[in-house]
Amino acid sequence: MKRLLTAAVILALLCSCQAPERQLAENEQPISFKVGYPTNNEKSLLVINSRQVVEAAGGEFQAELCDMSPISIITAMKNLIDDGCAGIVLMPTDESILPQVSELCEEGKIFWSISMRPVFDPRIRKILDDSEYFVGSVMENDETVAYDLMKLLWEHGKKKVVLVSSAKSDPVIVARERGIYRAAEEYGMEIVAGIYNAPNREEVYSAMSDLLVAKPEIDAVFNVGGHFTPLDMIVQAVEEAGRDDEIKLVSIDLDKNIGEYLDKDIVLAMAGGHHRIDTSLSAAMVANAVIEPLTVKGRDKLSYVVPYMLFSSSEELSLFNKFYDDRDGLLFTTDAVKRSLLNGFGDESGPPDFNAIIGEYTIENITRISRGGGAEKSVFD
């Protein structure tokens, strides 16, 4: 009995010596969950916009570095689950990994969403639809914009096209090539060659230079984009071949030099601008599922399509960049995230209306805000 009493006294003394519970600062929310994000760049705009949403919901955000190959994504997923993530936002560069991802999340009871990628395989789609923990997906109108860019080349008299792209197995490349080949058939164009999944920038330049010599009939290049988009290497090869007046380019996914290329008229148009809103919505879907799990289980999966912005002038691009520079790379203010994206924070009853928000995300609205036009508060503020 004496030994038991002594142990009890010691325990009481230990408890009395614990530091007092930390008081939360004004407007600070306690961290109640963690959301993970596999990425090859933890400082990217995709990461900072996703982080903002999760932290606004009272969660912690963890970027897990990987090279975005299928095997590295699976390893990153396992690491995030082991680190206690309650949710994960995923950009799958190959849809073949999705059954394994779904299994991992089912076992760990992890809510997850797909960002910036479609799912084509009906068997995989069924696995996701049947999952209690797959929340849904946000993707872009890749097939449509690829078709439109091919049509633009045709309108400028171009018919012999080279494709430059990342891996053909990437779902986003599959979607874009569907649009490309559909337009090629309709307008009598020909895909004369392709450069796929080059290991580095120099290889793209070398392959492009060789093609321009081997196939002098080439009059257009479509930078299909995806995970690896070395547009500057393509432009350099075309310029050094002395064919920049003859060969025209179109491209998907924004590039830091695109304003210069548009001014030179070597690039006719570039589709992009979608990344921030896509990842913000994808992260909000997961955060909402973690906050209110009953809103997810047993219902149809959410699915949203974000239209690309089509930039054809350096002025548009400059105003677009100014919008984000003025906001430190963020699309939404934190107040707007809570009001428009998250369950339980806004004044309106019912789930957030993501389609209405997507409808507001246009070149016209973003450039207007960037110019300071309009007295009304936007959905992003």
Image (cartoon, helix red, strand yellow):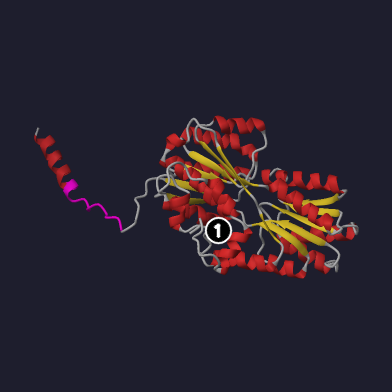
Q: In the image, what residue occupies the spot 48% across and 39% down? A: 111
At mark 1, the secondary structure is helix
Q: In the rendered view, does 1 fall on the left or right side of 347?
A: left
Residue 173 in the image: x percent, y percent? 71, 47
Task: Tell me which segment is drawn in magenta.
Answer: 14-25
Q: Is the magenta stretch mostly helix, strand or loop?
A: loop
Residue 17 in the image: x percent, y percent? 18, 51
Q: In the image, what residue occupies the spot 31% across and 58% down? A: 26
Residue 196 visible within the image: no
Q: Which residue is tagged 1?
A: 45
- Name the image quarter holding the N terminus: top left
Q: In the rendered view, does 181 fall on the left or right side of 87?
A: right
Choose between 329 and 363: the one closer to the eye: 363
Choose between 71 and 27: the one closer to the eye: 27
Residue 5 in the image: x percent, y percent? 11, 37
Choose between 336 and 348: the one closer to the eye: 348
For residue 178, what is the image quadrant?
top right
At label 1, counting other C-alpha atoms closer than 10 Å, the crowd grade (few under 14, some 14-19, many 20 or more) is: some
Residue 321 visible within the image: yes
Total labels: the figure holds 1
The amino acid on which the numbered mark 1 sits, given as a three-letter code, is Leu
Residue 183 in the image: x percent, y percent? 81, 47
Residue farthest front in this picture? 375
Can you say whether 55 is above or below 243 in the image?
above
Q: Does the magenta stretch include residue 313?
A: no
Q: In the image, what residue occupies the spot 72% across and 47% down? A: 144
